[in-house]
Amino acid sequence: MNQNQEMQMSEAMPANVFLILSGGFQDAYTYFCRGKVFANGQTGNVILFGAGLADRQWDKALRYLAPVLAFTLGIYMAEMIREKLKDSQNHIHWRQVVLLVEIVAMFAVGFMPQSLNVPANIIISFVCAMQVEAFRKLEGSAYASTMCIGNLRSATALLFNYRHTHSKTALGKSLKYYGVILIFAAGAVLGVKLSEIYQEETIWVSCIFLFISFLIMFIHGQEKNEAGQQ
């Protein structure tokens, strides 16, 4: 088989476009609709947690610590799902199970009022971590669907490589990473605009994006649950 045939659909661009849109959307939703907390950008939450401790504002510190802890648990849970289902012969892949958990959890968040922002942010951070752990490659290259810093580093390093080697492969990968960042930004813009209109229920749009990715993974190839698969 050639590289394209061996590549799983979970690494293909069609499925990942909607994962990336959802990643940007979720961050915008939690920040602008759920008390200025980042679902994916845990570095910002750690800094704000530290600021809360420094000011002895314990409620503020807890508000930013909770999603960090939830993100950690989400990564652990994704690995548990992979370990239990990687040898399964079922038609559904373990990454699709992760997406189903994410969809159900965020659908429930849409019913939570503003008084429940803390648990809402905990849930979203938890499932975001599951997504970032389950979907780590795009067309064979490492990437993140829920944050930008790693993608920006890779894009710029590859652009530098192209400038000095004139490698079309390096240029193509660089443009792909920059494209991912633009898609993420588009999801964020959509999240901001729709949050102004639909408030808490806006997160259901992210559920739609994820469900589209879930369906795409059935198309153009079979996701295989192989032992030791990453």
Image: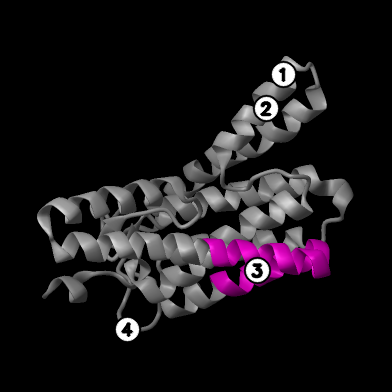
In the image, 57 versus 106, the foreground residue is: 57
The answer to whether one can see residue 167 in this image is: yes
Examine the image and state in which quarter residue 102 appears.
bottom right
**What residue does disc 4 label?**
220
CA distance separating discs 3 and 1: 33 Å
Task: Look at the image and say whether residue 196 sits in the magenta stretch.
Answer: yes
Is 177 displayed left or right of 160 in the figure? Answer: right
**What residue does disc 3 label?**
190
Is 112 displayed left or right of 163 in the figure? Answer: right
CA distance separating discs 2 and 1: 6 Å
| Residue range of the region highlighted in magenta in the rendering | 185-210
Q: Quadrant of the N terminus?
A: bottom left
Please tell me which of labels 4 and 1 falls first in the chain.
1
Amino acid type at circle 1 is Leu
Element assignment for label 2? helix
In the image, 163 versus 38, the foreground residue is: 163
